[in-house]
Amino acid sequence: MKKMQWIQATSAVVLAAGYLMSGAAQAQSKPQVIIGYEDNGADPYMVSMEEHLFEKHMKADVQYKLFSSGPAAMSALASNSLTFMCGLGVPPLVTAIAQGLPMAIVYNQERYTNAAGIVVKPDSGIHDVAGLKGKNIAIVAGSQASFELATFLAQAKVPYSSVTQINMAPPQMRTSWVTGAIDAAIVWDPVFSALRASGGKAIKTDGDLPRESSSYNVCIANSDWAKAHPDLVSGFVSALDAGYQVTMKDRDKALAEMAHATGVTVPVAKGELDGYELFSGADQTTPKVMGIDAGVKTSATYLTLVNTAKVLNQIGRIPSVPANFDNNVAPQYAKHLTH
C-alpha cells in the first residue's frame, strides 16, 4: 500500500514537473518583439504602451526601446535587432529603401500639422523663409527635417546651400538656442513647442505641406520579416488602433497616460497632440493614408515616398530615386480593421 502511494506521489511530481517544463517551454517559445520609438511628444501609441495593448494583441515577448531620432534607429532595423519602429519620419525610411533595405510602412500614425516646423529666435532678424539665407539652422540631418527644409527653401526660391545647417539631436537644440549658437531650428515636438514657448516664432509648420508631399510619423518593419509573421504584424496594427480608439473615446484618460509617458504636464501633452492629424486602423486603407490594392500607388503615403525621394536625391542625400515603392507601403495588415 505504501509502495503504491509512493508510486502515485512520484508520478504526480513527475507529471507536475512535466507541466511546469511544458509551460516554461511555451513561455520560451514566444517570439521576442522589440518596438522602437521616438519622443515625438504626445501620441496614441503611448496609450498602447501604457495600457499594454501590444502585449494583449500580440502573442509575443514585447520590449520597448527609445531612440533619439529616426536615423539612429535605422542601423538597428538593418541588423534585425529591432522589430518595429514607430514615430519615424519618411526621409530616414526612404534613405534606407534607397540603400536596398527591405522596409515597409505597416501603419501611418499621423500627419504633422502644427507639431513641427521652422522656429526662429526673436532677435535673429528672420521674418520668413527667405530670411534664412546666410543663417545657422539646427537640424537632425537625414530626418524628416531635411526634406521639409529643402521643400520650404525651394518654395521661397532660396538656394539650399545658402543656409548653414548644424546637425544636432533635438535635446541639444534647447542648449544651442540659449547660447546663441543657432538662429533657427527645424524640429518637431516637444522641442518645437518648447522653443516657441521660450519666445521663438514659427515661420513655417508642416501643415503648410501638401498631403501627398507631407510630414508623417509612421511605424515600419522589415518587409521580409512582416511577410513571414503576418499575425504578429496584424496584432501590432490592432494594438495601435486600440490606442487610437482610447484617445478618441476618452481624451482625458489618454492625455494623462501620454503625459506620464513623456514626463510633461497634461496641458503640454494636449498641445502636442493637437498638432497632429491622427489616423485610425480603418483609415490606413483609405486614399488619404495608404489606400489598398490598386489604390496604394495613388495614396498620400505612397506619393509622399516618391516626392520625398526626389527631394533627397536633389540635395544629395540619396544617389538615385528608387524605381518604385510597391513593397514599402503595406496596408494589408490593417485590412481587418476596415469598417
Image: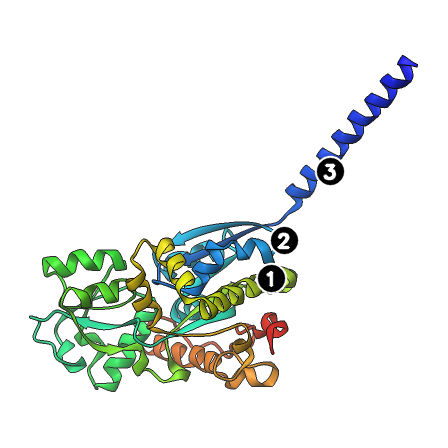
Crowding at label 2, few (<14), some or many (≥20) Cα neighbours within 10 Å? some
In the displayed structure, does residue 275 sit left or right of residue 33? Answer: left
Identify the residue at image location x=36%, y=76%: 313
Identify the residue at image location x=56%, y=85%: 295
Residue assigned mark 1: 235
Type of the residue with mark 2: Lys
Labels 3 & 2 near each other (Cβ < 8 A): no
N-terminal-most mark, 1 or 3 = 3
The image position of residue 317, as x and y in percent, is 34, 70
Query: Which label was assigned to residue 59?
Result: 2
The secondary element bearing badge 1 is classed as: helix
In three-dimensional space, the C-alpha distance between marks 3 and 2, rounded to whole angstroms, equals: 17 Å
The image position of residue 297, as x and y in percent, is 53, 83
The image position of residue 47, as x and y in percent, is 45, 60
The secondary element bearing badge 2 is classed as: loop
Q: Quadrant of residue 38?
A: bottom left
N-terminal-most mark, 2 or 1 = 2
Residue assigned mark 3: 22
Which sits in the foreground, 213 or 238? 238
Q: Quadrant of residue 225?
A: bottom right
